[in-house]
Image (spheres, rainbow, N blue to C red):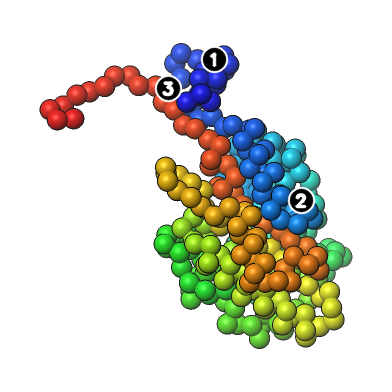
C-alpha cells in the first residue's frame, strides 16, 4: 500500500481516474540484479516482452543491460523503441512470416527457429540477401507437463519446437546449415516445478553434447534456456529462486556453466509480477444480508 500512497501523492493521477497499476522500478532493478548474480556474468538475460510490454518498464530493463525476447514482430518494435539494441534482441515467434524473417536478418536479430521448415526458409532468404545469420533451433524436450496445461509446452505433443525424438533430423539440420549455432528450450511458464524445468534443460543439453561429438568442437555456440521460473501470486507462495535454479542445473548439467556456450535466458513474469500493484477506487460498499 505504501507504493500506492506514494503514487497517489506524486500528482500523476486525476480525481476521475478509477484504477491504477503501479510498478516499483527499484524492486525490478533488484530482481534483475538477483537474476544476473545467480548466473555466469556473460549470460544474456533477455526479458520476455510479452510479460509486460509497457514502454517505461521495457526502457528500465534496457537501461539495466537486459536483452529482449520477442515472440511477435510488434514486440520487436516495442523492444527497439524502448532502447534495446538489435544485437540484444532474440526473435522467437513460432510463426514468422517471410517478411518478418527478412527484416530480422537485415536488423541482425538472433533468431530461434521453431521448426525444420523454417530453417529452409531462412536459408533461402540468407542466400538471397548475402547474409550469414546466427540461428538457434527450438527443441521440445518432451519431459512432461506442469500443473497448468495451457502454459506447459514440453509434453509428448507441443505445437512449439521440434520434438527431441526427431533427433536424427535435427542432427542432419546442423550438418546442413553452418549458421545453425544454437539450441533453444522452454519447458513452460508458471506451474512447472523446478525438477521439470531442470529435466527439460538437461535433455536438450545432452542433445547438444551429441551434436558436438558429431562435429568439430565449438560447433554449438549458444544455448537458450528459455524462462519458466514462476512468480509468487499468493501469500505463502515460495517459488524457486534463480540461485536455486542454477544450483539444480549445475548438478544435472555440470558442463553448462563452463564457458563453452553463450547462455541466454528468457525470464518474464518472475521479474516484473512481484513489482506491480493494482489499485482501484472504492465507490461504495453494498451490503446484502450475510454479506
Residue 207: x and y, percent? Answer: 67, 78
Residue most extreme to the left: 289
Q: Quadrant of residue 263?
A: bottom right
- Which of the two residues, 16 or 244, is positioned nearer the viewer here? 244
Which residue sits at x=84%, y=74%?
218
- Which numbered mark, 1 or 2, is in the foreground of this view? 1
**Element assignment for label 3:** loop
**Element assignment for label 2:** helix
Q: Quadrant for the C terminus, please.
A: top left
Which residue position holds label 1? 9
How far apart are the alpha carbons under marks 1 and 2? 37 Å
Please report contact status of discs 2 and 3: CB closer than 8 Å, yes or no. no
- Which numbered mark, 3 or 1, is in the foreground of this view? 1
Which residue position holds label 3? 18
Q: Quadrant of residue 65?
A: top right
Which residue sits at x=49%, y=32%?
277
Specify whether residue 109 is in view. no
Q: Residues within 10 Å of mark 1 (few under 14, many from 20)?
A: few
- Which of the two residues, 219 or 198, is positioned nearer the viewer here? 198
Is tag 3's residue or tag 1's residue first in the polypeptide sequence? 1
Residue 83: x and y, percent? Answer: 75, 39
Q: Is residue 88 above or below residue 17?
A: below
Side of 255 where 138 appears, left or right: left
Side of 157 where 141 appears, left or right: right
Which residue sits at x=78%, y=62%?
262
Which residue position holds label 2? 88
Amino acid at each position: 500500500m505504501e507504493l500506492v500512497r506514494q503514487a497517489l501523492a506524486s500528482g500523476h493521477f486525476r480525481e476521475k481516474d478509477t484504477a491504477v497499476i503501479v510498478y516499483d522500478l527499484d524492486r525490478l532493478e533488484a530482481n534483475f540484479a538477483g537474476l544476473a548474480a545467480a548466473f555466469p556474468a556473460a549470460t544474456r538475460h533477455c526479458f520476455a516482452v510479452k510479460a509486460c510490454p509497457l514502454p517505461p518498464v521495457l526502457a528500465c530493463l534496457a537501461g539495466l543491460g537486459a536483452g529482449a525476447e520477442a515472440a511477435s514482430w510488434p514486440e520487436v518494435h516495442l523492444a527497439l523503441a524502448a532502447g534495446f539494441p538489435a544485437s540484444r534482441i532474440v526473435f522467437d515467434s513460432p510463426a514468422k512470416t517471410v517478411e518478418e524473417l527478412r527484416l530480422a536478418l537485415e536488423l541482425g536479430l538472433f533468431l530461434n527457429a521453431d521448426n525444420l521448415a523454417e530453417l529452409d526458409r531462412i536459408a533461402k532468404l540468407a542466400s538471397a540477401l548475402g547474409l550469414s545469420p546466427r540461428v538457434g533451433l527450438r527443441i521440445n524436450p518432451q519431459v512432461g507437463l506442469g500443473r497448468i496445461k495451457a502454459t506447459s509446452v514440453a509434453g509428448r505433443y507441443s505445437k512449439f519446437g521440434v520434438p527431441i525424438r526427431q533427433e536424427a533430423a535435427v542432427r542432419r539440420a546442423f550438418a546442413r546449415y553452418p549458421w545453425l549455432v544454437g539450441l533453444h528450450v522452454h519447458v513452460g511458464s508458471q506451474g512447472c516445478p523446478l525438477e521439470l524445468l531442470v529435466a527439460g534443460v538437461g535433455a536438450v543439453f545432452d542433445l547438444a553434447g551429441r551434436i558436438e561429438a558429431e562435429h568439430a568442437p565449438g560447433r554449438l555456440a549458444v544455448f537458450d534456456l528459455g524462462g519458466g521460473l514462476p512468480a509468487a501470486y499468493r501469500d505463502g507462495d515460495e517459488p524457486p529462486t534463480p540461485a536455486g535454479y542454477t544450483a539444480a542445473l549445475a548438478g544435472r548439467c555440470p558442463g553448462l556453466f563452463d564457458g563453452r556456450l553463450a547462455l541466454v535466458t528468457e525470464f518474464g513474469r518472475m521479474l516484473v509480477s512481484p513489482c506491480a500493484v493494482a489499485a482501484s477506487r472504492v465507490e461504495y460498499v453494498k451490503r446484502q444480508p450475510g454479506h
